Image (cartoon, rainbow, N blue to C red):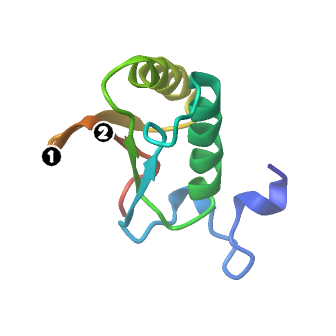
Amino acid sequence: MTESDKVCPKCDSPLQRQTDGSTTTLDIAHGKQRINEAIEQLRSAIEKHQRSPTQFLRVIVGGDRIRQATLNELQAMQSQGTILQFGQDDRNRGALIIVLKRSK
């Protein structure tokens, strides 16, 4: 990501802080993805939505190997500061909610 991608071109506000409170859903479990493909989809979506006003990313991970690999990846991303936090979706055991930005 270049320096110009990190700020809004209109107001110079850091993109990491801009949010409209929206949630975007991504399914990485039902397209017959291999684990490495699912993790790459996750990484790409996080990178994309960090530059958008999306605050939360809801990721459908299923209940098996993709889920475990995703949890491992998200733990690493959280410790690196790439995401703020993540947790179980209360409405769907096969989904996780990732917090990309804090609300104002």
| Residue 27 position (above or below residue 63) | below
x and y, in percent, of residue 24 in the image: 42, 60
In the picture, measured across the screen, residue 23 lies left or right of residue 83, that is: left
x and y, in percent, of residue 70 in the image: 47, 26
In the picture, measured across the screen, residue 96 lies left or right of residue 37, that is: left
x and y, in percent, of residue 55 in the image: 42, 58
SS of the residue at dot 1?
Answer: loop
| Residue 35 position (above or below residue 100) | above
Residues tagged 2 and 1 counted as in contact (Cβ below 8 A): yes
Mark 2 crowd level (few <14, some 14–19, many ≥20, 10 Å Cα): many
Amino acid at dot 1: Arg
Q: Quadrant of residue 21?
A: bottom left
x and y, in percent, of residue 2 in the image: 84, 53
Q: Residue furthest front?
A: 32
**Residue depicted at x 15% and y 41%:** 90
| Residue 93 position (above or below residue 57) | above
**Residue depicted at x 37% and y 66%:** 22
* Residue that numbered label 1 is attached to: 91
SS of the residue at dot 2?
Answer: strand
* Residue that numbered label 2 is attached to: 95
Amino acid at dot 2: Ala
Mark 1 crowd level (few <14, some 14–19, many ≥20, 10 Å Cα): few
